[in-house]
Amino acid sequence: MRIARKLTLLAVTAVAAMAMMASTASAVTVTNEGGSACSALVAGDHTYTGGCLLSASSPAGNPVELRALFGIMYLCDNVFTGRVNGNGEGFIYNQTLRAPGTLNPCQIQPQNESDGHARPWPAELTAENGCGAGCDTMEAVFSVTGPFGVIVNCHLVNLELRQASHTAATVKTPGSTHVFCENDGTNAVLGTWNVTSPAPGLEVG
């Protein structure tokens, strides 16, 4: 019997331009904890409906770090909403990055499209138990604009989705050091996001 897991995107995951997901990603099936398949996603105006809801935020006082050519940048207090379909494919949207403990914008912001809205970031659940028992893997592509208008693109693979209990889960970069973006020897990320979506858990298989 597969173990039901509550997953929430971080996203963190929680940084980079839209790109194709790695063709090597494993095929998975994602259902609600009750066994109902996640439906197809329906695109709206920079948002999505349908599928299964995933949400995450960075722990207070522990911002996600982005190491780039010009040094380490902090993603401040970041909150993300996302949805995935029955194949584990989806998008992160409603990205909010604020200076710690305030409503002020962070120095880093999601890259905007030409209409001024934040560009949704692709995300995908890629393997059941891909990082050990009770740990599923995912990947995400994100784009942020840093100081002086510098755009940083990043495709993170092998993000770890771990469920500590039936109601508590985290998404984190593997290991304890900065993880390079795929095919990138400069930009790297280190961080953890707490799952905040209280919706039914997801089963990945």
Image (cartoon, rainbow, N blue to C red):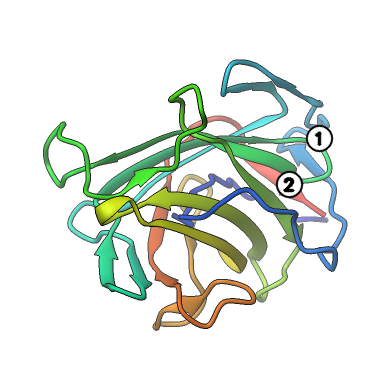
Drawn side of residue 174 relative to residue 32, left or right: left
Task: Give the structural element (helix, strand or loop) at label 1.
Answer: loop
Residue 137, above or below 174: above
Gap in angstroms between the C-alphas marked 2 and 1? 8 Å
In the rendered image, residue 19, in percent from the top left (x then y), is placed at: 68, 53
Left or right: residue 77 compared with residue 167: left
SS type, badge 2: strand
Q: Nearer the viewer, residue 184 or 103?
A: 184
Circle 1 is placed at which residue position? Answer: 35
Quadrant into which the C terminus falls: bottom right
Which residue is located at x 64 percent, y 59 percent? 139
Q: Any mark on residue 203, and which?
A: 2
Direction from residue 188 to residue 35 in the image, left or right: right
Q: Position of residue 70 (x, y in %)?
A: 29, 73
Dividing the picture into quarters, in which one does residue 75 lie?
bottom left
Do residues under tags 2 and 1 come within 8 Å of each other at their CB atoms?
Answer: yes
> Looking at the image, is mark 2 or mark 1 earlier in the sequence?
1
Amino acid tagged 2: Glu
Residue plotted at (49% across, 22% down): 115
